[in-house]
């Protein structure tokens, strides 16, 4: 609650994946009035958007704002180009599935929406443990972004800075799953696979599937994911 | 030129307006290999995009990358909503034509493109003098953004940081026009008006037209703008 007794508004970046579904539950658990924001950024896995709608509905928040964002005009990533998604362990360093400056772009658009809906917080499911190859998942980036955003917006200039909340940043996948399960997140509704089949079933073999599977196993929580045969 | 003798690549944010046309000429004047980036961000003045294409062609650079960016899904500004554009002097403080976090969003997408095309610089025509009401036109924001971007991108992490160049930031409109005219910029191709008629002719009365008109007068450069009768 804010000083005036109203719920604090928050923009939640929702991808339809396991992490952002957990973030939404954490934000709601702190009493935030959540405005979810999804991107249709030209990725091949449109199943993510459908998952995001299911997750928002299941958690009782308004339908996400869906922002078309055609990063294909830039190229440069396995998630937006037609190059093959690598199997787990095939790549070293920064993964080829890295989308250029993705979290910078996503957070910037979240800051724009936050200003419009008068939100005091932006929640994002970045994680510096499992995705250590992505530079834009590190705490130093989140802090630098927050500073830049508060110099860019009317709210920031007028003494109502926006805060970026990244509650998963230091958690393992198993810890994320345990926290979400405790809050009643239905992970059957979420989608993580980089390379699903035409029915949206997870491949079970890409980096994202392997991390997710291992996370459920380590958390001791049954994995509700439907994998392609 | 870079250390290897190749031209330094630059992403230039091109709006079709007077300022960004000048920025492109300045970048070319420093020998940059320019990749122009335009946004179709749901604004009512599609004439800007046409102007951007004309400006790029006239300066002999490749056609701009045109990125659809539908900020209408957020609302919140006279440039993207259907509220009336104010005449000059009608508003105080931050103008109602302010687009939430616009330069933050534009620069973030420019950083993504810069990473894809391996550009070492992003050039932007922000100006802290005439547009002092816009928080995201100030040097402090530009510096904070540059820092955040270099923590977000593969290039930044790998020791090839991107630099944000804002050569107009401390210039008056008259100084901008004088520099551009000296570089041969054809301002007849540019478009500044917030409220053009259906043939694209400038209204001559909005904030942007008034600043532009006064700039030409103060610069002692003939104003080639075609105003609606």
Image (cartoon, coloured by chain):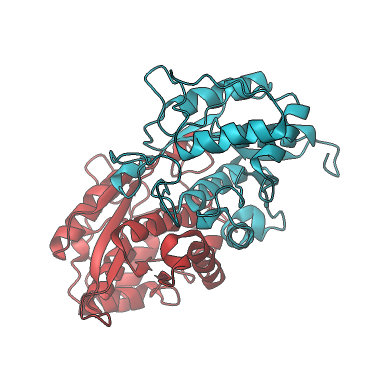
Chain colours: A red, B cyan
Q: Residue at x 40, y 50 (%)?
A: B91
Image coordinates of residue A2 in percent, x first then y, are 27, 80
Q: Residue at x 40, y 71 (%)?
A: A160
Image coordinates of residue B181 in percent, x first then y, are 73, 27
Tell me the quarter of the picture where residue A144 sits. Answer: bottom right
* The one of A204 and A186 positioned closer to us in this rendering: A186
Quadrant where the C terminus of chain B is found in the figure: top left
Q: Is residue A57 above or below residue B165?
A: below
The reply to whether residue A201 is visible in this rendering is no
Q: Is residue A101 above or below residue A224?
A: above
Answer left or right for B49 relative to B33: left
Quadrant where the N terminus of chain B is found in the figure: top right
Image coordinates of residue A92 in percent, x first then y, are 59, 57
* The one of B205 and A15 positioned closer to us in this rendering: B205
Q: Is residue B39 above or below residue B169?
A: above
Q: Residue at x 28, y 78 (%)?
A: A178
The reply to whether residue B126 is visible in this rendering is yes
Q: Residue at x 27, y 74 (%)?
A: A8
Answer left or right for A63 relative to B153: left
Image coordinates of residue B13 in percent, x first then y, are 58, 39
């Amino acid at each position: 609650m804010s000083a005036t007794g109203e719920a604090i508004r928050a923009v939640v970046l929702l991808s339809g994946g396991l992490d952002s579904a957990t973030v939404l539950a954490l934000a709601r658990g702190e009493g935030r009035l959540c405005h979810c924001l999804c991107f249709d950024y030209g990725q091949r896995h449109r199943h993510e958007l459908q998952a995001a709608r299911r997750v928002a509905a299941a958690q009782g928040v308004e339908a996400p704002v869906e922002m078309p964002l055609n990063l294909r005009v830039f190229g440069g990533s396995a998630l937006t180009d037609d190059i093959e998604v690598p199997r787990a362990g095939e790549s070293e360093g920064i993964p080829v599935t890295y989308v250029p400056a993705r979290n910078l772009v996503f957070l910037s658009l979240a800051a724009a929406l936050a200003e419009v809906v008068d939100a005091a917080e932006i929640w994002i499911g970045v994680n510096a443990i499992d995705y250590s190859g992505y530079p834009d998942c590190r705490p130093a980036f989140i802090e630098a972004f927050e500073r830049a955003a508060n110099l860019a917006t009317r709210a920031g200039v007028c003494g109502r800075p926006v805060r970026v909340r990244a509650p998963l940043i230091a958690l393992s996948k198993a810890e994320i799953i345990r926290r979400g399960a405790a809050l009643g997140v239905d992970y059957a509704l979420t989608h993580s696979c980089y390379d699903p089949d035409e029915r949206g079933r997870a491949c079970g073999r890409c980096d994202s599937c392997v991390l997710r599977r291992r996370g459920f196993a380590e958390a001791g929580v049954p994995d509700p994911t439907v994998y392609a045969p």
